[in-house]
Image: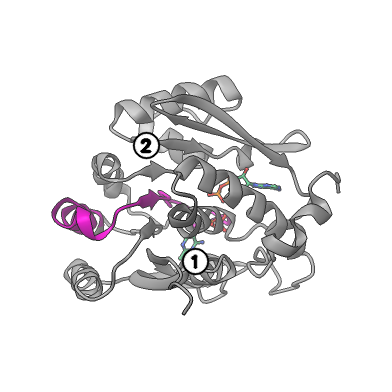
């Protein structure tokens, strides 16, 4: 009999367009051979053209979903995405504090604003988000999110990303990945990793596409999917970024919706990796 696949959990919001949130995360888990489970924090009315509404799940019902799930299912790793409200963040923090044994690895994508500019996190939830940092294994802010958490200006270069990663560690985050997708500019998309052992620059080719909806969600859920297999969050992040670059390359073939389309989660890393690795499309 084959051993069971790893089990990953996403704690996030729903995106009906299927590019980001719970839907994107579950596709990512499946694409990477990991069994997916999900706890919903919120519903969005969302398409590739933007978000027209947010409906927040009551915090006590988020807790009920979490407790009911982990009482039964042995989760190997979790990814946290859209938390929407201060009350939900406080609830997830209390759960992680009490049940740390139930979720051995936690990747936090501190989702705040959608690509089109809609708020996905209440203004009064930034301070509770800071309080959550000591409870997670890895935080993966993009450049604007790192700036909000630190009440600073968004980084425009690697030196500032480095300084902000150090400051996020000082707030209690064990490992930090500051994602450089928003920096733009050159032929590469470079993220900065920082942990106890020091800094690593994770660089991939920058794909020329407008179809980037759900990239941050796909990266954090891919890290959670791969961490149980690799046994190392840094190695999981390297492999997740390689897979993500493939999903961006494959995105133009999807043609979903009329706005910036989603990444193609079904990209097969195991089959296609070497097809594009050294090319410079
Ligand atoms: N056009 C692109 N080509 C390749 N990688 C990209 C591109 N845009 C973003 N990335 C990568 O996707 C991941 C998500 O990045 P980013 O856009 O910064 O975050 P978010 O989606 O949360 O706003 C990072 O690993 C980043 O380097
Ligand atoms: C329900 C939901 N969660 C998260 C996001 C943000 O997704 P992300 O992958 O960070 O990136 P964008 O596609 O918004 O750039 C979302 N839109 N919806």
> Can residue 141 be seen in the rendering of this structure?
no
Start and end of the magenta stretch?
A: 89-118
Under circle 1, the secondary element is helix
Query: Residue 129 is drawn in which quadrant?
Result: top left
Who's the residue at 56% across and 73% down the image? 18
Is residue 93 covered in magenta? yes
Q: Residue at 62% across / 68% down in the picture? A: 48
The circle drawn on residue 115 is none
Q: Could you tell whether 71 is left or right of 196 in the image? A: left
Q: Position of residue 238 (x, y in %)?
A: 58, 44
Is-magenta flag for residue 36? Answer: no
**Mark 2 within 8 Å of ligand 1, using the beta carbon:** no
Compared with 230, 35 (above or below) is below
Which quarter of the picture shows residue 30? bottom right
The one nearer the camera, 216 or 38, is 38
- Quarter of image, res 158: top right
- For label 2, the crowd category at 10 Å Cα-Cα, with few meaning under 14, some 14 to 19 and many 20 or more, is some
Give the x, y percent position of residue 68: 20, 75
Q: Earlier in the sequence, mark 1 or mark 2?
A: 1
61 sits to left or right of 220: left
Q: How far, Cα to Cα, is label 1 from label 2?
A: 24 Å
> For mark 2, what is the residue?
149
Q: Nearer the viewer, residue 275 or 181?
A: 275
Residue 69 coordinates in the image, percent (x, y): 25, 74
Marks 1 and 2: which is nearer the front?
1
Identify which residue, 223 or 207, lies in the foreground. Answer: 223
Tell which residue pokes out farthest to the left in this image: 98
The answer to whether one can see residue 232 in this image is yes
Q: Residue at x 56, y 19 (%)?
A: 159
**Percent of width and height locating residue 225:** 48, 60
Residue 25 circle label: 1
Which type of secondary structure does the marked residue at label 2 adopt? helix
């Amino acid at each position: 009999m084959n051993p069971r696949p790893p089990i990953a959990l996403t704690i996030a919001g729903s995106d009906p367009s299927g590019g980001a949130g719970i839907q994107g995360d579950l596709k990512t888990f499946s694409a990477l051979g990991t069994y997916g489970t999900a706890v919903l924090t919120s519903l969005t009315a969302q398409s590739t053209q933007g978000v027209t509404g947010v409906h927040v799940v009551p915090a006590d019902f988020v807790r009920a979903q979490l407790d009911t799930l982990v009482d039964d299912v042995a989760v190997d790793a979790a990814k946290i995405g859209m938390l929407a409200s201060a009350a939900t963040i406080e609830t997830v923090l209390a759960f992680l504090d009490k049940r740390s044994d139930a979720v051995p690895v936690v990747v936090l994508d501190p989702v705040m604003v959608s690509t089109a500019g809609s708020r996905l996190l209440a203004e009064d939830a930034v301070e509770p988000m800071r309080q959550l940092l000591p409870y997670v294994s890895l935080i993966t802010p993009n450049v604007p999110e790192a700036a909000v958490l630190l009440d600073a200006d968004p980084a425009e270069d690697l030196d500032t990303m480095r300084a902000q990663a150090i400051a996020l560690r000082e707030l209690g985050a064990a490992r930090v990945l500051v994602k450089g997708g928003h920096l733009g500019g050159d032929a590469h998309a470079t993220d900065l990793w920082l942990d106890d052992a020091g800094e690593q620059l994770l660089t991939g080719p920058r794909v020329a596409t407008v179809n980037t909806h759900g990239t941050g969600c796909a990266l954090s859920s891919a890290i959670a999917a791969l961490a149980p297999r690799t046994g190392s969050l840094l190695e999981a992040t390297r492999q997740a970024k390689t897979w993500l670059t493939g999903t961006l390359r494959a995105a133009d073939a999807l043609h979903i919706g009329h706005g910036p389309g989603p990444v193609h989660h079904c990209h097969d890393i195991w089959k296609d990796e070497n097809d594009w690795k050294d090319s410079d499309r």
